[in-house]
Image (spheres, rainbow, N blue to C red):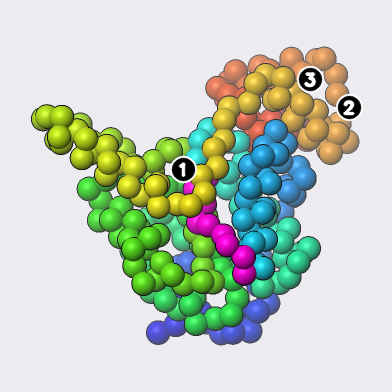
Amino acid sequence: MSVINNVKQLKENNFFIFIPRSNKLEPIKTNFYVKLEDLLEISYQKDVVLKNTTNFLENKFSNNILLWGAKGMGKSTLVKCVVDYCNKEFSEDLKMLEVLNNNIEHLIDIVYQLSKYEYKFIIFIDDISFKDNDDNFNLFKTLIEGSLLSHVENVRYYITSNLRHLSHRRTDILNNDIESKENNQNLISLSDRFGCWVGFYDSSQEQYINIVKYYLKKSSIKYSKHLERKALNWSVEKGNFSGRTAQQFVKNLK
């Protein structure tokens, strides 16, 4: 049974989500209020992800990407914006498929089905983490590198996580140095299979205020020192200086 309802649906849409109950990829109509140029203070990260994606479209060497690091700094938004940008600027042949992180066991069927089509697919999994004795940990590790399905040329994985190595360290088996070393090796064995790591780091207060000013201007709201103080108070309540916090602050003013 195909996970794709029909070829016309695939042609007419660029964003899909996997629905496990029906075992189908369903199109998602999206309005991107945030564009690639709106993502501030992550210029290097944008360049890396965009370059890898254009290489993928042009049949040049490209990698699976792990986007890891600080929350709210635009990891998942960057992936979506890059796919949207590439389809508008270069072609309509790039498709993004979101698989929720509790549906990883379906990836074998999904990737096999996608390999039959001429389109390029980015499989996107957001906010992923494993226990390293999780069955999905081993399955996903094999799919990234090790399986025949790892060599499907029209599929790449773009994964986001707050954890650099995607898995939590086990403390229940560390009885000696050998077991500790083996546990550490297993801990990094999944993330190590991604050819490209892109790190995201907390913004400074200055960077946060610059992002606030940008979204104020975009929303036709005049900047003032009073609003700056409110933005800083907002960041204290949220506990960070992230781009997400800046955007939420400005949205709250409307």
Q: What element does badge 1 sit on?
A: strand
Question: Tag on residue 194?
Answer: none
Query: How many discs mark residues in the rendered view?
Result: 3
Give the mark, 3 or 2, whose residue is nearer the N terminus.
2
Q: Position of residue 146 (x, y in %)?
A: 34, 63
Range shown magenta: 59-67
Residue 194 sits above or below residue 44 on the image: below
| Label 3 Cα neighbours within 10 Å, binned few <14 / some 14-19 / many ≥20 | some
| Residue displayed at 54% across by 72% down | 154
Give the mark, 2 or 1, whose residue is nearer the N terminus.
1
What kind of residue is marked 3? Leu
Q: Nearer the viewer, mark 2 or mark 1?
A: 1
Residue 12 sits above or below residue 95 on the image: below
What kind of residue is marked 1? Ser
Question: Tag on residue 161?
Answer: 1
Q: Is residue 111 visible?
A: yes
Residue 93 sits above or below residue 236 on the image: below
Residue identified by numbered label 3? 227
Residue 196 placement, left or right of 233: left
| Label 1 Cα neighbours within 10 Å, binned few <14 / some 14-19 / many ≥20 | many
Q: In which quadrant of the rendered image does the N terminus lie? A: bottom left
Q: Position of residue 86 (x, y in %)?
A: 71, 61
> Could you say which quadrant of the image residue 203 lies in?
top right
Q: Is residue 172 visible?
A: no
Give me the C-alpha separation between circle 2 and circle 1.
Answer: 35 Å
> Could you say which quadrant of the image residue 135 lies in?
bottom left
Q: What element does badge 3 sit on?
A: helix
Q: In which quadrant of the rendered image does the C terminus lie? A: top right
| Residue displayed at 63% across by 42% down | 45
Residue identified by numbered label 2? 222
